């Protein structure tokens, strides 16, 4: 196992340096069995994620647009002791497709790299960086977009390169 890297500035620099390599890696992964790749990514995620403290980083909260369901709107409004309408007015907007999204980046609920509504955080926040989900190959482009931002993604991808013998 490669040593974990959590220095976000170093990760950002590496991402720029490895951009061409990652494009080649993305093409390389297309020839692999998707189910076997999912298993490998899930295993790496289960090993790497617990070793990285997201509350030290919070980059996803600073950079991602978050969709919010009606149920989540009601749940968080209740937790904040405000009406769902007030929550929508203060924190949400509708996308062009009519979906509710947080109306600012970084997220309103980020405080000192931590989520101030962590127990009630949105589904998309709970699922990020989505490495526990199936169809990794189908989401690879989106995953690599966040490679420079997320230490978990960076470390999983770099270890994956070794495990699938793309890189020694």
Image: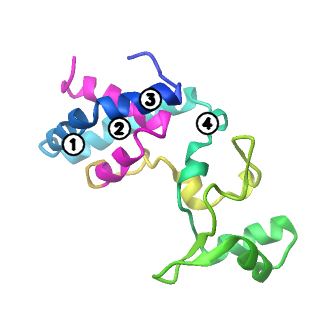
Q: Please state if 74 lies on the left or on the right of 126 as rendered.
A: right
Q: Nearer the viewer, mark 1 or mark 2?
A: 1
Circle 4: element type: helix
Quadrant in the picture for residue 23: top left
Callout 1 crowding tier (Cα within 10 Å): few <14, some 14–19, many ≥20: some
The range drawn in magenta is: 139-168
Read off the residue under disc 2.
41
Q: Nearer the viewer, mark 3 or mark 1?
A: 3
For the residues labelled 4 and 1, the Cα–Cα distance comes to: 26 Å
Spatial CA span between label 2 and label 4: 22 Å
Residue located beneath label 3 in the image: 11
Quarter of the figure with the N terminus: top left
User: Residue drawn at (63%, 69%), measured in percent from left and top?
Assistant: 103
**What residue is drawn where x is 44% and y is 15%?**
3
Q: Is residue 154 magenta?
A: yes
The mark that comes first in sequence, 4 or 1, is: 1
């Amino acid at each position: 196992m490669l040593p974990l890297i959590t220095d976000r500035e170093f990760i950002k620099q590496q991402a720029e340096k490895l951009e061409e390599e990652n494009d080649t890696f993305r093409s390389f992964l297309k020839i692999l069995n998707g189910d076997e790749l999912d298993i490998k990514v899930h295993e790496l995620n289960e090993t790497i994620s617990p070793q990285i403290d997201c509350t030290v980083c919070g980059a996803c909260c600073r950079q991602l647009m978050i969709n919010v369901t009606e149920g989540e709107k009601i749940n968080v409004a209740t937790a904040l002791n405000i009406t769902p309408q007030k929550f929508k007015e203060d924190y949400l907007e509708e996308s062009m497709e009519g979906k509710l999204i947080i109306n600012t980046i970084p997220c309103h609920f980020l405080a000192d790299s931590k989520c101030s509504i962590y127990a009630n955080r949105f589904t998309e926040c709970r699922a990020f960086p989505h490495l526990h989900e199936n169809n990794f190959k189908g989401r690879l482009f989106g995953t690599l977009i966040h490679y420079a931002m997320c230490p978990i993604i960076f470390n999983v991808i770099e270890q994956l390169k070794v495990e699938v013998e793309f890189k020694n």
